[in-house]
Image (spheres, rainbow, N blue to C red):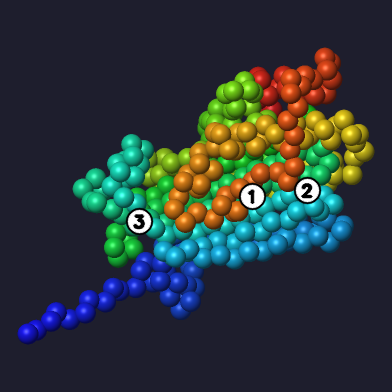
């Protein structure tokens, strides 16, 4: 009697990528997935280092490095109870996995390059996300996320790809000069690549970060975009755009936190900040697609997904802002988004 020889599975795409990075490093000729991974990890280090330098109490980020069974992993950097930030998170996520046919069919609505005749496809996703919740109610909360997604054949050759991302500002108290500076800095990054990007992605942001059950936006906007692929621009052009957007983050936000972090505030103003953070929680848990996708992904790292939530928040029954108050002024802008530049 003869038995067939044991069939050993070859190395996974994640294993092969790890070997390439170890032996050859990441260069301009490397696959886009490796270049995006290297870029977001470098940006994470720079942002964490810069934010730590702001804190006179020398509070440091807790750094958690984690891995996924199917390949990839991430680095979650979270700071809590600092003197400048009540909570701050800067996370990278690198994911390898397999898309089943129903997911492929759903994605083909926006990406015709996906092969419709396969039962499954290997995929890769890389992203850097950041949420900062300051202690001082005069200082705004800020968020950004920039990401890359691609599908591959069994050999690791790219089949389809796209970029997504954006950034937005969420103040508890509105300072027009802060809003103008934030939006102007983002616009300058966009204008380097396409003067139509900022107005288009600003409108997309206003629409996305809307809380329907409250009839108001989460904040005062920024930019938001998704599914940017070869139908938009060439891959290198879009990668350059993503890099400019991400490197514009610190110049867009640092002047604001440096200006507002030491301003005096009252208990009433702190209470209002907690109410606004309640709205932040409502949007993230009820309407945010990224949170929903993450929580419904098998093997998801819940702590990293929910790092965007503030350390504290508050809900007061039937709360109304006083007429003519700073609080009422903010609500008017949240209900009717404004053009800042």
Whether residue 213 is visible = yes
Q: Are marks 1 and 2 in contact (CB under 8 Å)?
A: no
Q: Quadrant of residue 47?
A: bottom right
Q: Identify the residue at image location x=44%, y=65%.
A: 69
**Between 188 and 92, which is closer to the camera in this rendering?**
92
Q: Identify the residue at image location x=78%, y=48%.
A: 86
Q: Is residue 265 left or right of residue 280?
A: right
Counting from the top left corner in percent of width and height, residue 103 is at 34, 45
- As drawn, which residue projects farthest toward the left? 1
Estimate the spatial distance between the alpha carbons at disc 1 and disc 3, rounded to whole Å.
25 Å
Whether residue 179 is visible = no
Counting from the top left corner in percent of width and height, residue 8 is at 26, 77
**Between 263 and 135, which is closer to the camera in this rendering?**
135
Q: Is residue 77 above or below residue 142?
A: below
Of marks 3 and 2, which one's residue comes earlier in the chain? Answer: 2
Per the image, the residue denoted by label 3 is: 98
Q: Identify the residue at image location x=47%, y=40%.
A: 226
* SS assignment at label 2: strand
- Residue 307, label in figure: 1
Assess disc 2: are there few (<14), some (14-19) or many (≥20) residues with their C-alpha within 10 Å of its C-alpha: some
């Amino acid at each position: 009697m003869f038995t067939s020889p044991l069939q050993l599975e070859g190395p996974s795409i994640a294993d092969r990528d790890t070997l390439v990075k170890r032996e050859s490093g990441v260069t301009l000729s490397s696959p886009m997935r490796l270049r995006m991974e290297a870029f977001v990890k470098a940006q994470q280090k720079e942002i964490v280092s810069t934010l730590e330098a702001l804190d006179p109490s020398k509070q440091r980020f807790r750094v958690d490095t984690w891995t996924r069974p199917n390949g990839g992993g991430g680095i979650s950097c979270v700071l809590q109870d600092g003197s400048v930030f009540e909570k701050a998170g800067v996370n990278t996520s690198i994911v390898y996995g397999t898309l089943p046919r129903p997911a492929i069919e759903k994605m083909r609505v926006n990406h015709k390059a996906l092969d419709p005749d396969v039962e499954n496809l290997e995929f890769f996703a890389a992203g850097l996300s950041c949420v900062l919740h300051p202690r001082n109610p005069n200082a705004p909360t800020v968020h950004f996320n920039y990401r890359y997604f691609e599908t591959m054949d069994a050999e690791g050759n790219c089949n389809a790809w796209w970029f997504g991302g954006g950034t937005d500002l969420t103040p508890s108290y509105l300072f027009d000069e802060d809003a103008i500076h934030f939006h102007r800095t983002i616009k300058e990054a966009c204008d380097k690549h396409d003067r139509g990007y900022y107005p288009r992605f600003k409108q997309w942001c206003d629409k996305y970060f809307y809380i329907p059950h409250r009839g108001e936006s989460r904040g005062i906007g920024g930019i938001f975009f998704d599914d940017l692929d070869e139908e938009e621009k060439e891959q290198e052009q879009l990668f350059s755009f993503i890099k400019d957007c991400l490197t514009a983050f610190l110049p867009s936000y640092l002047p604001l936190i440096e200006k507002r972090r030491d301003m005096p505030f009252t208990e009433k103003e702190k209470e209002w900040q907690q109410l606004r953070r309640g709205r932040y929680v409502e949007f993230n848990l009820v309407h945010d697609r990224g949170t929903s996708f993450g929580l419904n992904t098998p093997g998801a790292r819940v702590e990293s997904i929910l790092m965007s939530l503030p350390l504290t928040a508050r809900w007061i029954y039937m709360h109304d802002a006083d007429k003519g108050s700073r609080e009422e002024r903010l609500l008017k802008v949240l209900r009717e988004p404004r053009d800042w530049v």
